[in-house]
Image: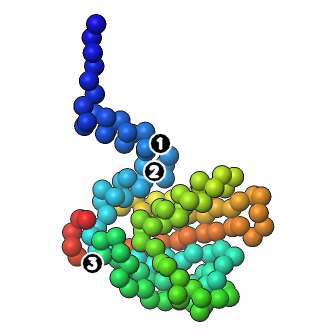
Amino acid sequence: MRRFHIGIPLAWSMASLLACGTPLARERLAWEHRRPAAYTFEYTYACFCPGSGAWWRIAVEGDSVTRTELMDSSQAGRGLNDARTMHHPTLTGLFDQIASRAAAGGEIYSVTYDPILHYPVRAQGRDPTRTDSRWTIEVRNVQTTGGGAK
């Protein structure tokens, strides 16, 4: 009788492959491998929510937002003052936001990714069972600010 022993490296590789089952998970893993240690980006989040449509510049070091700056509020809807105090995500955090919406079930969503760094460039979705549930995230002007790879 033969016994097979799966070592830690193989078991880890198999778990990683299983975890990468969705395009969102695969792209997140690719982003984590290429993510710079420090970067800036601009993003907007459009939904039926405070500050919808405003563009923000976010500075990130490691896994932390270090600075936020309102870039353009000309398309912002109601509640811009509330949006100024809201938590703004890192690019990794955007993956979390998209994943949490997708995990809710019933959510219809699509995501396009940067072909080199693999962060979400545009994500949009809606819950067909809810009114005013459409949302869109757009990212632009991602720039490394030093520090090399994470």
Q: Look at mark 3 in the image and give the residue it sits on.
A: 145
Q: Amino acid at mark 3?
A: Thr
Of badges 1 and 3, the one in the foreground is: 1
Residue 145, relative to residue 29: is it above or below? below
13 to the left or right of 139? left
Q: Look at mark 1 in the image and give the residue it sits on.
A: 21
Q: Which residue sits at x=68%, y=62%?
A: 126
> Rounded to the nearest whole Å, what is the CA distance between mark 3 and mark 2?
26 Å
Q: How is the image coloured?
A: rainbow
State which quarter of the image contains the C terminus: bottom left
Q: Are marks 2 and 1 in contact (CB under 8 Å)?
A: yes
Mark 1 vs mark 3: which is more N-terminal? 1
Q: Nearer the viewer, residue 67 or 73?
A: 67
Residue 93, relative to residue 16: is it above or below? below
Q: Look at mark 2 in the image and give the residue it sits on.
A: 25
Q: Amino acid at mark 1?
A: Gly
